[in-house]
Image (cartoon, rainbow, N blue to C red):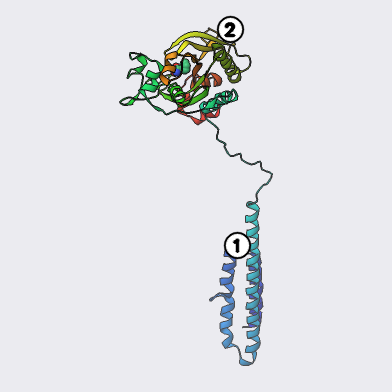
Amino acid sequence: MDLHNEAVKIREAAAKAIQACRTTEDIEAVRVKYVGRKGRLTQLLRKLGDVPAEQRKEAGRILNETKEELTSLLTSRRSEIEESVRQQVRASETIDVTLPGRKPRLGKLHPTLRVLDEIVNVFIGLGFAVVEGPEIETEYNNFDALNFPPWHPSRDDFDSFYVAEGYVLRTHTSPAQIRVMKSQDPPVRVIVPGRCYRRDTPDASHLMSFFQIEGLYVDHDVSLADLKGTLAIFAREVFGPQTKIRFRPHYFPFTEPSAELDISCLVCAGKGCRLCKHSGWLEVLGCGMVHPNVFKHVGYDHRAVTGFAFGLGVERIAMLKYGIADIRTLYENDVRVLNGL
Ligand code: PHE
């Protein structure tokens, strides 16, 4: 057998096979086939012993050179393949910097809180200070000091949550009036935002827990005209400059005279529609001049000072502003609904 010829044939066949390789698995297969332990060239090298001694050196050199050559061809083809795989990966992982970014979803304040902030800010602008009171109140502050007679129906278990002897979850923010006046001398000009509780069965217009904002202004010469002027500004700021207001006589134990404030209907501007039940007006809050008996309870001289107070339901105003028909919407907190508000 002509070892030299054989080596040249193997070299040519192997070089072709290496060129045709597409994957590193192909490379490995070619390597095993030609230069592996049972590969064609390896087998040829084993036959070197059969070659006559004087030719053996030359034949050995040729075979070893061929092996080195094939090994280096395999190595360089392998790196070519690896490089092209890397390039493909790189191309597929390219970041398109011209793609518009995805906006992260931003949270926002709950509509009830938004309206509460807005109203509070109007009164801050008018010089009112913001204070808070506890949600668990004494029966005395919640009722007695506010001139509720002992037999008043809202004291009933059915209307109030009694938490212990003499304590209730406040049914309105008005007890904060007592706390503020007991802690300071006139002039007093405060608003009190906060949560209140009543034993109502939840329906489209009632919740067991809701927010109120109380207002109280006491000084030496506060009149009903001050109340009217203050609430007119509030109505225009919160509901828009075209808003008209009217007082309707009402009754609260802790104010005299008492009134409810109506605003011209936000939907029909007074012509009459479903929202205002064809009256042209929407009821927004209760108010009045502080009753002398309340001043007596807090130790103010009821002959020397006068004052006005008002209390409004925040959810009710949020419903009017956002056109929400059912107050429970504001407590169910369905994000799909809240996002649209
Ligand atoms: N506290 C009353 C209520 O909850 C509202 C009110 C406050 C009325 C202050 C007059 C003065 O209905």
Residue pictured at 56% horizontal, 83% vertical: 46
Kind of residue at badge 1: Thr
Circle nearer the N terminus (2, 1): 1
Q: Secondary structure at mark 2?
A: loop
User: Residue placed farthest to the bottom in the image?
Assistant: 54
Eyeballing the image, is 271 above or below 138?
Answer: above
Residue 124 in the image, given as x and y percentages of width and height: 57, 26
Kind of residue at badge 2: Lys
Mark number for residue 75? Answer: none
Residue 330 in the image, given as x and y percentages of width and height: 48, 25
Q: CA distance from mark 2 to mark 1?
A: 82 Å
- Specify whether residue 339 is in view: yes
User: What is the quadrant of the C terminus in the image?
Assistant: top right
- Horizontal relation, residue 249 to residue 83: left or right: left
- Horizontal relation, residue 176 to residue 27: left or right: left
Neighbour tally class for label 1: few under 14, some 14-19, many 20 plus, Cα within 10 Å? some
User: Residue placed farthest to the right in the image?
Assistant: 98
Residue pictured at 56% horizontal, 79% vertical: 43
Residue under numbered circle 1: 23
- Specify whether residue 205 is in view: no
Mark number for residue 271? Answer: 2
Asked if the beta carbon under badge 1 is closer than 8 A to the nearest atom of ligand 1, the reply is: no
Q: Secondary structure at mark 1?
A: loop
Residue pictured at 57% horizontal, 17% vertical: 230
Residue 55 in the image, given as x and y percentages of width and height: 64, 89
